[in-house]
Image (spheres, helix red, strand yellow):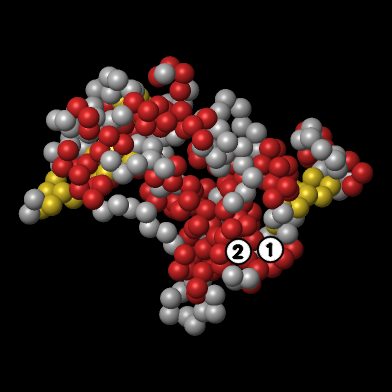
């Protein structure tokens, strides 16, 4: 099979369209978990309870905020995409339609098709290319490593398999990495913010070249967020990653930092909590370059890990 066809099957799933045209990522997160299981040599068919336990943290962190997590939905609906099979230990209990109840789910197993499972098991680099393609299409690269880790894909050993020095028949799969970054965008954003992090004013330069300062997309480029200054924020590397992870967001109109209470740990207050309710410390001189309301609303609704209603 050609890589394009394989990628097509795994990256063009039927997904619900959420607010703002966001394609629900839930099925893709389930797929990443299933690929991870395959790479670990686990059984093809995975008990629902096991899927649920592994999928909940993925949904909580990397799907738009929801009061209730519903791992049963991707587990059930992915069977319609031709890459996922379901079976039940009580075969007569497998319903024809409609998401089954808890009791029925508890008896169910789900897994990749035999063909895909074998393809991935025998070619870990193909499995990783598919995982990478899913990530490239949906998440900024600052999140890729942690998503893989949460999905149970061991980057060291699983990516290590596709060693560049090894003769590798399926190397062509690695050519499909996409690069969308517009090189002008970071320069323009960082200049508009006068070489400073908008949140903490971090600004270290060597020979006038800023170090550790990055241009974050407010609305992700994976969701057609444009590469223009009003969709950007200059952020230090830490605040960039925290912003992409939804640890904080920025309120529209008054540009106040709003910190999610789901994040904690060493440095939590120093790097994050202390900026809660602060106004952005730096804004571009040109009003048109200020963060645009529609992009901030998108971030609040889809990326921020907290209740958006208090901000909108
Ligand atoms: Zn910062």
Q: In the rendered picture of this protein, how many numbered marks are placed on residues?
A: 2
Tell me the quarter of the image containing the C terminus.
top left
Residue sitting farthest toward the left: 207
Q: Nearer the viewer, residue 287 or 116?
A: 287
Q: Are marks 2 and 1 in contact (CB under 8 Å)?
A: no
For label 2, the crowd category at 10 Å Cα-Cα, with few meaning under 14, some 14 to 19 and many 20 or more, is: few
Q: Quadrant of residue 51?
A: top right
Quarter where residue 124 is shown: bottom right
Determine which quarter of the picture holds residue 123: bottom right
Quadrant for the N terminus in the image: bottom right
Q: Secondary structure at mark 1?
A: helix
Nearer to us in this view, 250 or 290: 290
- As displayed, is residue 270 above or below residue 146? above
Q: What residue is shown with label 2?
A: 5
Position of residue 158 measured from the top left corner of the image (x, y, whole percent): 52, 64
Mark 2 residue element: helix
Classed neighbour count for the residue bearing mark 1: other residues with Cα under 10 Å, few (<14), some (14–19), many (≥20): many
What residue is at 68 percent from the left and 37 percent from the top?
Answer: 73
Viewer-nearest of discs 2 and 1:
2
Q: Is mark 2 within 8 Å of ligand 1?
A: no
Q: Position of residue 218 (x, y in %)?
A: 35, 36
Estimate the x, y position of residue 234 in percent, counting from the top left.
Answer: 24, 39
Tell me the tag on residue 117. Answer: 1
Out of 236 and 129, give the one closest to the viewer: 129
Q: Nearer the viewer, residue 213 or 151?
A: 213
How many angstroms separate mark 2 from mark 1 (CA)? 16 Å
The vertical placement of 265 against 221, above or below, is: above
Q: Residue furthest bottom?
A: 167
């Amino acid at each position: 099979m050609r890589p394009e066809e394989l990628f097509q099957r795994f990256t063009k799933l039927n997904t619900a369209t959420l607010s703002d045209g966001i394609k629900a990522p839930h099925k893709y997160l389930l797929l990443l978990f299933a690929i991870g299981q395959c790479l670990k040599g686990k059984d093809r068919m995975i008990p629902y309870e096991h899927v649920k336990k592994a999928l909940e943290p993925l949904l909580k962190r990397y799907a738009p905020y929801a009061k209730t997590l519903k791992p049963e939905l991707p587990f059930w609906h992915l069977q319609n995409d031709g890459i996922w099979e379901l079976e039940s230990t009580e075969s007569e209990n497998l319903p024809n339609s409609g998401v089954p109840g808890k009791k029925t789910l508890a008896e169910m197993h789900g897994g990749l098709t035999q063909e895909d499972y074998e393809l991935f098991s025998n070619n870990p680099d193909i499995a990783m290319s598919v995982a990478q393609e899913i990530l490239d299409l949906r998440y900024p690269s600052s999140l890729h490593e942690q998503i893989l880790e949460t999905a149970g894909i061991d980057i060291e050993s699983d990516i290590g398999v596709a060693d560049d020095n090894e003769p590798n028949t399926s190397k062509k799969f690695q050519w499909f990495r996409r690069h969308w970054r517009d090189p002008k965008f970071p320069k323009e954003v960082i200049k508009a913010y006068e070489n400073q992090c908008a949140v903490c004013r971090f600004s270290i330069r060597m020979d006038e070249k800023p170090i550790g300062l990055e241009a974050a997309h407010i609305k992700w480029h994976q969701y057609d967020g444009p590469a223009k200054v009003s969709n950007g924020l200059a952020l230090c590397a830490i605040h960039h990653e925290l912003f992409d992870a939804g640890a904080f967001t920025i309120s529209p109109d008054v540009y106040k930092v709003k910190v999610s209470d789901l994040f904690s740990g060493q440095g939590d207050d120093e790097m994050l909590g202390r900026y809660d309710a602060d106004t952005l410390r730096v804004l571009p001189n040109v009003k048109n370059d200020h963060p645009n309301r529609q992009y901030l609303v998108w971030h609040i609704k889809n990326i921020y890990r907290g209740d958006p209603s208090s901000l909108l």
